[in-house]
Image (tube, rainbow, N blue to C red):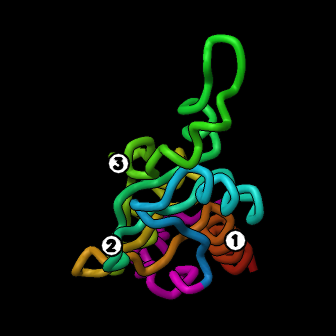
Amino acid sequence: MISTNSKDLLAMPISDFIISSEKVAHVQSGNNAEHALLVLTRTGYSSIPVLDMKYRLQGLLSMKMITESILGLEHIEYEKLPNIKVDTIMEKDIAVLKMTDTFQRALDLVINHAFLCVIDEDGTFAGILTRRVILKQLKKYIYQKEK
């Protein structure tokens, strides 16, 4: 059973669990959908962060968003891909964590997201926090408390 005295876990800063921005596949807002589709396909990710030229987080882009942008009435219009800019099809209203946020805030947000983007105080993309990492930390905490 999980102890009700779990404030030590929930108050932990997320900074120790972040996957650094250098290791995260992303696209820039000025890229076209064809490039973004290549990045998504090669990495195998379902969605990736979109950054501006100064590496500030702008939104998220998924394979579904790209596919929906090229659906025609009778066929998929692949020829449109080079002319569609990422910033016109990305999701701009996304859940974001700050480097100073706690494990509790991350846990609250990750329920509906496979990963959360993390920004620093200037809005620069710092990396991501994945649901997998959060669950691993929760599991570790639970098993330590059982001993």
Q: Nearer the viewer, residue 52 or 57?
A: 52
As helix, strand or loop, the secondary structure at mark 2 comes to loop
Mark 2 highlights which residue? 56
Q: Residues within 10 Å of mark 2 (few under 14, many from 20)?
A: some
**Which circle, 1 or 3, is nearer the viewer?**
3
Point out the image quarter for the N terminus.
Answer: bottom right
* Picture residue at 31% right of the left edge, 79% below the top: 54
Mark 1 highlights which residue? 136
Counting residues from the start of the chain, the first of labels 1 and 3 encountered is 3
**Which circle, 1 or 2, is nearer the viewer?**
2
Q: CA distance from mark 1 to mark 3?
A: 29 Å
Residue type highlighted by circle 2: Arg
Residue 114 lies in what quarter of the image?
A: bottom right
Q: CA distance from mark 3 to mark 2?
A: 12 Å
As helix, strand or loop, the secondary structure at mark 1 comes to helix
Residue 92 got which mark? 3
Q: Nearer the viewer, residue 108 or 129?
A: 129
Counting residues from the start of the chain, the first of labels 3 and 2 encountered is 2
* Picture residue at 35% right of the left edge, 60% below the top: 58
Residue 52 lies in what quarter of the image?
A: bottom left
Q: Is residue 16 magenta?
A: yes
* Image x and y of residue 65, in percent: 55, 38
* Image x and y of residue 80, in percent: 57, 37
Look at the picture and state if 45 lies above or below 139.
above
The magenta stretch spans which residues?
Answer: 1-22
* Image x and y of residue 11, in percent: 39, 76
Q: Is residue 78 magenta?
A: no
Which residue is the extreme one toward the top? 73
Residue type highlighted by circle 3: Lys
